[in-house]
Image (cartoon, coloured by chain):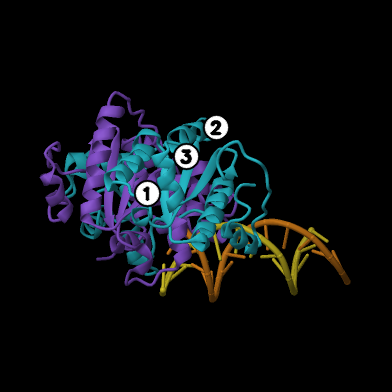
Chain colours: A purple, B cyan, C orange, D yellow
Amino acid sequence: MREQRSRVITYLRKEKSISIEYTSLPSGDYVLSSSAVCERKEAQDFVLSILDRRIFSQVPKMKSEYETVVVVIEGNIFKTRSAIEPAALIGALSWLIVLEGISVIFTDGPAMTAALISTMARHAQNGLGYTISLRSGKPKDQNAIAQYLCEGLPAVGGAKAQDLLDHFKTAHAVFNATVDQLCEVKGISRQTAQKIYNASRIQWRK
Amino acid sequence: MREQRSRVITYLRKEKSISIEYTSLPSGDYVLSSSAVCERKEAQDFVLSILDRRIFSQVPKMKSEYETVVVVIEGNIFKTRSAIEPAALIGALSWLIVLEGISVIFTDGPAMTAALISTMARHAQNGLGYTISLRSGKPKDQNAIAQYLCEGLPAVGGAKAQDLLDHFKTAHAVFNATVDQLCEVKGISRQTAQKIYNASRIQWRK
DNA sequence: ACTTCCGATCCTTGA
DNA sequence: TCAAGGATCGGAAGT
């Protein structure tokens, strides 16, 4: 549904061999087969999704539902209006490919995007149609929720959130820990422990 | 060895953190780690390798030796001197990605190729080296801390966070509430209550 | 994603 | 043993 206004759909409709079905997807824009999905992003949107960190939660989520994830980027990411370090772009691409194991491909516009999507759909359905998806990424996705929750604590970022969860196993246990117990975690001093302890016990004043 | 004459090597040599070791590889140009390899191809060479079908034997071979295979294509494959149908190029790319499960990425020249290779090598060998924090812009005002903490819960935004705190007074009480108690809050359905209850009790998996 | 900045943490010294 | 100093890590904000 999100893609309705894109010109990619116009091009896809022209292809006889393609049948399009519209649905509201939890994540990802084009489902190619039961195990492959394609997320289309315009260059500007790709850059913005790095800046606001959207992409770093979106992609693992897709990875947890589909074996093959392809990100199609339309346009030149090095020439957007956003001021972003080229190193950050290279880093994001490398993260996608090497650490998340997904494919990234650039197109010059909606026509090429459409051609690519229809070809990939054909390959995915005829070539790998019978492959079963193992949904291997699921636990990772759950971890993100717990980590995200802990990152709400003062003085706690990504690293400390993981350290706390390594020690306590659940966010619930972290919130119920005493100051002494929190101190046992490496990198948590008495001062930080007290801040963490206090945070969840702050009295709400309307 | 095959890559010695490329300008990519010149750029890689400039990076202090990179140490280069030359070997004669059976296939693939740059070994990023024990499980990742990168094959660099200039656009013209990529097109030729499709025409003479070299690529269709090369890639599966690499795939059998390395878990992650990345093909870096330098230049624009749609503007080479060879007469090849764009559809054939799209088809080859789709085959690589969807059927062989490898990543393809385009660069505009040796400088970008080198930057990408060094970043991918770092990621493949050390991971990120830090964690991405999923939340940013934390408040320091007391009341806001409590609200912000509750906003980490699934399906809970600013308004619901305030409703929860109006009812329970502290974030601690929210996290320790039973599903039934959560349901008593206006605007919290049983389904949402369950999600809230579960979130803080998710088991952390390393 | 990366960079820069800053404060907290820890680690070593040396009296 | 402990205090002061510096190296290091981690968080926050900005690109």
Which residue is pictured at 32% across the width and 25% down the height? Answer: A132
Q: Which mark is residue A169?
A: 3
Residue B127 to residue B60: above or below:
below
Residue B206 in percent (x, y) is at: 50, 38
Residue B59 lies, with reference to residue A10, above or below; the image says above
Q: Which residue is mark 2?
A: B65
Query: Which element carries disc 3, helix, strand or loop?
Result: loop
Q: Name the amino acid type tagged 3.
A: Lys
Q: Earlier in the sequence, mark 1 or mark 3?
A: 1
- Position of residue B99 measured from the top left corner of the image (x, y, whole percent): 36, 33
Cα distance, mark 2 to mark 1?
22 Å
Q: Quadrant of the C terminus of chain A?
A: bottom left
Chain identity of mark 3 = A
| x and y percentages locating residue B159 in the rendered image | 21, 59
On the question of residue A34 being in view, the answer is no
Q: Which residue is mark 1?
A: A104
Q: Image point 51% across, 53% down: which residue?
A: A159
* Left or right of B187, for residue A57: right
10 Å crowding of disc 1: few (<14), some (14-19), many (20+): many
